[in-house]
Image (cartoon, helix red, strand yellow):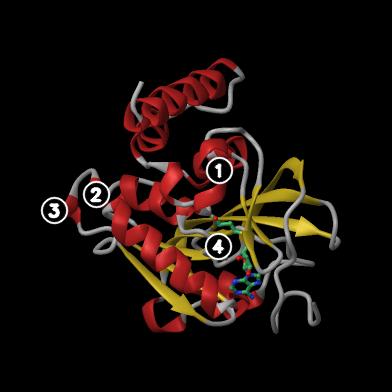
Amino acid sequence: MNEEDFFRVSRERVVEMLEREGYLRSSLVKKALLTVPRELFVPENLRRYAYFDTPLPIGYGQTISAIHMVAIMTEALEPLPGLKVLEVGTGSGYQAAVLAEIVARMDPAKKGHVYTIERVPELAEFAKRNLERAGYKDYVTVIVGDGSKGYPDEAPFDRIIVTAGAPSVPKPLIEQLDVNGRLVIPVGDRFVQRLLIAEKKPGGELDMKWGIECVFVPLIGEYGWRDE
Ligand code: SAM
């Protein structure tokens, strides 16, 4: 089997597993996970582990999340073609690519877009390279900065996803979420969090539901944890 076939079969197998285990509900999320080549988002020496359902190191003490966590968070966010999404915590760019596949690449005429913010400049560069070679350059904008402050230049957003653990929901993210928009964010202490899924009501208040427990690297910033 050549390398391309090996990765395609590995991708199909992991998606089958996610479906069997009940992590996948939407055909859009399934299609995106079957399409985005995760092997292009992990460091070269770890490529053969790209479809192991586990977080993998990407340098600078950071990780690309496990595939089931990407499935859970993407399902919770309910992305649709044409929506404007903000991701805080670009890392490898893989989650941004999965979202861009759904909101932008599946139906480019609807003009959806993903904005993603990373605080470590070297990782933002890594993600940009990965997104470009995977074909997502035109659908994802990578920004270097403190995403706990959101990205006011492009607000409001239809969807906001945070892929680092926060002590509480950053106020700017609530302000930058559009009415009827959804926010998915791990909230807890520095080591263990619970997934918070929130919807913004017309009055501006959040309708909140708690999901599963999870373990993310900390959200470091003005509205996150203050120190490394
Ligand atoms: N979504 C990523 C992926 O698909 O590879 C995985 C994200 S990794 C678990 C968390 C990322 O959040 C790290 O790259 C970390 O540097 C970044 N981060 C932490 N605090 C941040 C902040 N305030 N603003 C932007 N990025 C932040």
Q: Nearer the viewer, mark 3 or mark 2?
A: 2
Q: Nearer the viewer, mark 1 or mark 3?
A: 1
Residue at the left extreme of this rendering: 109
Looking at the picture, which amino acid does disc 4 mark?
A: Gly
Q: Looking at the image, in which quadrant does ligand 1 appear? A: bottom right
Q: Identify whether 120 is placed above or below 214.
A: below
Which quadrant of the figure contains the C terminus? bottom right
Q: For the residues marked 4 and 3, what is the alpha-carbon distance in whole angstroms?
A: 28 Å
What is the secondary structure assignment of the residue under circle 2?
helix
Tell me whether circle 3 and circle 2 mark residues in contact (CB < 8 Å). no
Tell me whether circle 4 and circle 3 mark residues in contact (CB < 8 Å). no
Query: Mark 4: few, some, or many residues within 10 Å (few <14, many ≥20)?
Result: many
- Whole-percent x, y for residue 130 in the image: 39, 59
Looking at the picture, which amino acid does disc 1 mark?
A: Val
Q: Identify whether 172 is placed above or below 215.
A: below
What is the secondary structure assignment of the residue under circle 4?
loop
Labelled disc at residue 109: 3
Looking at the picture, which amino acid does disc 2 mark?
A: Arg
Q: Identify whether 195 is placed above or below 5.
A: below
Query: Mark 1: few, some, or many residues within 10 Å (few <14, many ≥20)?
Result: many
What is the secondary structure assignment of the residue under circle 3?
helix
Residue that label 4 marks: 91
Q: For the residues marked 1 and 4, what is the alpha-carbon distance in whole angstroms?
A: 13 Å
Q: Residue at x 56, y 15 (%)?
A: 20
Tag 3 or tag 4, which sits nearer the N-term? Answer: 4
Specify whether tag 1 is near ligand 1 (CB below 8 Å): yes
Q: Residue at x 24, y 49 (%)?
A: 105
Q: Based on the displayed image, in which of its 4 quarters is residue 35 positioned?
A: top left
Residue that label 1 marks: 70
Tag 3 or tag 1, which sits nearer the N-term? Answer: 1
Q: For the residues marked 1 and 3, what is the alpha-carbon distance in whole angstroms?
A: 26 Å
Residue that label 2 marks: 105
